[in-house]
Image (spheres, grey):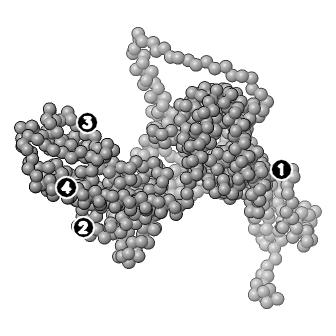
Amino acid sequence: MENEDDDPIIQELDVYLAKSLAEKLYLFQYPIRPLMMNYDDVPHLSARIKPKQQKVELDMAINTMSPNYCRSKGEQIALNVDGTCSDETSTYSSKLMDKQTFSSIQAASNTSRYAVAFYRKGEIHVTPLQGILQLRPSFTYLDKADTKYREREAANDAGDSSQDEGEDDVKQVTVRFSRPESEQAKQRRAQSYEFLQKKQAEESWVHLHYCGVKDSRSEHERQYLLCQNQTMTENQELMKSPSEYLQMLMPPSVEEETEKPVAPSNVLSMAQLRTLPLADQIKILMKNVKVIPFANLMGLMAAGTESIAVLRCIQQVAMLVQGNWVVKSDVLYPKESSSPHSGVSAEVLCRGRDFVMWKFTQGRWVVRKEVATVTKLCQEDVKDFLDQMAVPRINKGWEFLLPYDEDFMKKHPDVVQRQSMLWRGVQSKLEKVFNLSKEDATSKKSEVSSASSTVITGDQVLNIARAKAKENQARLEKDLQKKKEQSRLASSVTVVADVQIKEEPVSDDDSMDTSAYQSFNNGLANGVHGSENSDQSVNGDNKDPVGKELLEFVVSTFRKQYVLTMSELKRLFNLHLAALPPGHILFSGISDKMLQETVLSSGCKQILVPFPPQSSATPEEQKVFALWSCGDSYDKERQALLELFSKGHRLRRNMIQARMSQEFGETVSKQQLDKVLKDCCVCYGGMWYLKGTVQS
């Protein structure tokens, strides 16, 4: 009662249902722009409709006299679209872009809940809507401009080729014969996007006459929004009891039996998908994703779905590869289908794709050329197989798309055993079809089993990387100390004239290849004239000219780059050598060890970045050096950032920001952080890496 007193009823209105325009009334939603002229100012506004598709196009006039309108741009667009000649097909007859086309789309699939209300003299007249259309700018005139440009280019090419009268090009033509189309293939083609687009384009436009708001015809049609007969017999639909009216407002939830949701071909609606049986849900998902871990598949299922039921269904449409589920070949290629590239039957495609899947059960990598050689399929078909379940890596081949799922293999050993038996059957079938040797299969299988057994957790990866980094640091410091002692001893030794002694690298792996620059030496021995006396050791102190030149190069390089890997430093050094004149002292031969010691003695430090064990980085790419102090105001922030990368090989910006704030308080601004990150790091995929450590 208190609530009723606070909100009293002010007025009661009669509601009438008008049906005169019930099946003809549409609601248009369109943008109003500053350059668009008022409809009342443009009585000749052009409009057209395709009734079957309920598609409308409006040409709205642009105010070309507005100070916001660029006339030169409008003339250029009209010239690009229509060219120099004007006829009936011209888009812009005034040689100026003076109109904008708006094309409609369906704003709501079900408009039975929407109506238009007309208020007059204390009465509300309601008319149901037939459709709601959103009008959006259409840019088909750009396509027309592109077509005109291509036609002009083709005409120019034809004119040039006609000058060569004596030369007739002979082109190879491939002739293919299409097989008779089955009924299922016809139905699939009739449901394809290309066929539907073609059917929609065939429907002709019906041009409409636009009537303004104040037009007499508009006034006449507006009267149909009022209920013509206001007697009780005409409005029986609104004369309901309170219970019936409440039931109309909130109908009971009854499953629709007449209209079941049809599984979409390429776009999935999760709301519609979850109305299907579980087996159909999983089949449709697998046909779209191709490869998925079991944990991700469970995340797509409705809440309360049991994993046992999902496992039972997934095994009917997919196979287990490296702990992940890959859709079966016969699900993707039904019996009546064929290759769009070569036209081979579905049976041949299934055998070829099964071979690719089986190869991935043997190892992480597959070479496309090898698959094409064994399966005798064209390169396009093989590439389709690999695109579904792998990613290409430069100079390595194709790597399986997802990492090895050790958790699933441990949790479901019965499923793994059953899938292993199925794969043995597939392997025996492939051996007969492709004449595969069992020895290769067993040897590769042992390699995969050993590789899969080395899968470890993230914490173990980090601990192993830290241990290796500490071990490498201790070894490098020990080698550096030993080298310094040897250099002190060598400084006191008298070297015989015309004889130069150079310490070679300890191992072949540490040697730097400078053979590409031997042509600059012009017959010199080690880049130094034999007639000159050499009383300096190559690895001596700062008095050594070779060490001094090398030190200058290292210092100047790190002043520019701040962070370099060993491989990148060697590349820059080789470029530096190429720019030197013949006979320069650095052509005497610089070993990797000497270059690394020069870097450490120049004020740089090695950053022990914990690369993951599965990283493809070479040992030289894993050696990361950074300029520790360069004398500017950013040294402390730069050092704190480098210390962060000794704990992880990639970091997020918010983590770096939090660490900087914890270390220096609120004194670190965004500009300072951007400067430090720009000096030392690169951003890739939302993560920050030290320069040269990104592994794609």
Disc 3 from disc 1: Cα separation = 74 Å
Q: Secondary structure at mark 3?
A: helix
Q: Secondary structure at mark 4?
A: helix
Question: Going from the N terminus, do you reach mark 4 or mark 1 first?
Answer: 1
Rendered location of residue 245, percent (x, y)? 88, 69
Image side of residue 99 versus residue 492, left or right: right
- Whether residue 138 can be seen here: no
Q: Secondary structure at mark 2?
A: loop
Disc 3 from disc 2: Cα separation = 38 Å
Q: Which residue is mark 3?
A: 516
The mark found on residue 632 in the picture is: 2
CA neighbours of label 3 inside 10 A, class few (<14), some (14 to 19), many (20+): few
682 w.r.t. 532: above or below? below
CA neighbours of label 4 inside 10 A, class few (<14), some (14 to 19), many (20+): few
Rendered location of residue 496, percent (x, y)? 8, 44
Disc 2 from disc 4: Cα separation = 35 Å
CA neighbours of label 1 inside 10 A, class few (<14), some (14 to 19), many (20+): few
The mark found on residue 486 in the picture is: 4
483 w.r.t. 382: above or below? below
Disc 1 from disc 2: Cα separation = 72 Å
| Residue type, numbered disc 1 | Glu
Q: Which residue is mark 1?
A: 259
445 w.r.t. 178: above or below? below
Rendered location of residue 363, percent (x, y)? 57, 42
Nearer to us of marks 4 and 1 is: 4
Disc 4 from disc 1: Cα separation = 88 Å
